[in-house]
Amino acid sequence: MAYKRILTIQDISCVGQCSLTVALPILSACGLETSILPSAVLSTHTAGFTGYTFRDLTGDMPAIKDHWKKEQLQFEAIYTGYLGSREQISYIREMFRELKTASGVTVVDPAMADNGKLYPGFDGAYVEAMVALCADADFVVPNITEACFLTGMEFKTQYDRSYIDGLLAALAEKGMSNVVLTGVSYAEGRTGVVVYEKGVYSYYEHELLPNSCHGTGDIYASALVGAMMRGKTAVQAAKIAADYTVDCIKETAKLDNHWYGAAFEPVLYKLHEYLK
Ligand code: PXL
């Protein structure tokens, strides 16, 4: 197995099982050397906790990038999640250009919105910068809410295949031609993920569990990137990541009052098996 070095850029939410505290163990479990660039440090994530601290690390980014360049460090993938500011997006776009190997892959999870709404602290200017970052990426991994913000399309909870085709066409129009669209449900009690790669549509459907957990988008994107870097196609990786995310949600359902994140650790061994 090729041993690859990847970089993931997202926040450290000290408590809350999301972003780097999820991405780092999952990518490591996939057998990848995982370098990190924290975009911000928060005491907890912003979904359900109140009074959290927030330290934006944008100011550290230029010197970190310059140091890595001086050391001639490069990455076979750069994968971004929740970011700390609109300003840091321009540094990250420079990193895509300057710190990726010639065959390297860039993946953007535009982690900024869910259930029809932007997360606290994000606004239209942030969305605009995120559109530019997504257009630079080889793959984007939005949920339907994020795809709507990226394209200006109306958010719907009831839809059919033509609505999803419209979203994919609008994303392609903005320069995002390889898309893994999560949370796409065409039937009651079912959900799934669409992979749209250079105009070819595929859909992997699985059960919709009654309990939803925070942080599953980060688990999904991390497992997807991990599997792709292990040589799986986008369609294979999308299925592996979906099966693993379902395992995590089922594991969380066994717990009382575990509302803030998903118990991804006890089933990490399953991801390892799916990659065999
Ligand atoms: O899971 C996405 C995420 C990551 N990081 C922070 C968040 C959220 C979603 O709310 O608040 C800080």
Image: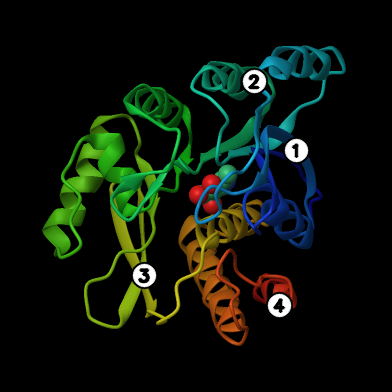
- Which residue sits at x=30%, y=53%? 144
Q: CA distance from mark 3 to mark 2?
A: 35 Å
Whichever of callouts 3 and 1 sits on the residue coming sooner in the sequence is: 1
- Which residue sits at x=68%, y=15%? 59
Pointer 1 with pointer 2, Cβ within 8 A:
no
- Which residue sits at x=53%, y=75%? 243
The residue type indicated by label 1 comes to: Ile
User: Looking at the rendered structure, which numbered label has been put on residue 58?
Assistant: 2
Whichever of callouts 3 and 2 sits on the residue coming sooner in the sequence is: 2
Q: CA distance from mark 3 to mark 1?
A: 29 Å
The residue type indicated by label 2 comes to: Thr
Q: CA distance from mark 1 to mark 4?
A: 25 Å
Pointer 2 with pointer 4, Cβ within 8 A:
no
Pointer 4 with pointer 3, Cβ within 8 A:
no
User: Looking at the rendered structure, which numbered label has been put on residue 36?
Assistant: 1
State the image quarter where residue 237 is shown.
bottom right
Whichever of callouts 4 and 3 sits on the residue coming sooner in the sequence is: 3
Q: CA distance from mark 4 to mark 3?
A: 21 Å
Nearer the observer: mark 1 or 2; the answer is: 2
- The residue beneath circle 4 is 273
Name the foreground residue: 132 vs 111: 111
Whichever of callouts 2 and 4 sits on the residue coming sooner in the sequence is: 2
Q: Position of residue 265 (x, y in %)?
A: 73, 71
Image check: 49 left or right of 64?
A: left
Name the foreground residue: 13 vs 102: 13
Name the foreground residue: 199 vs 12: 12
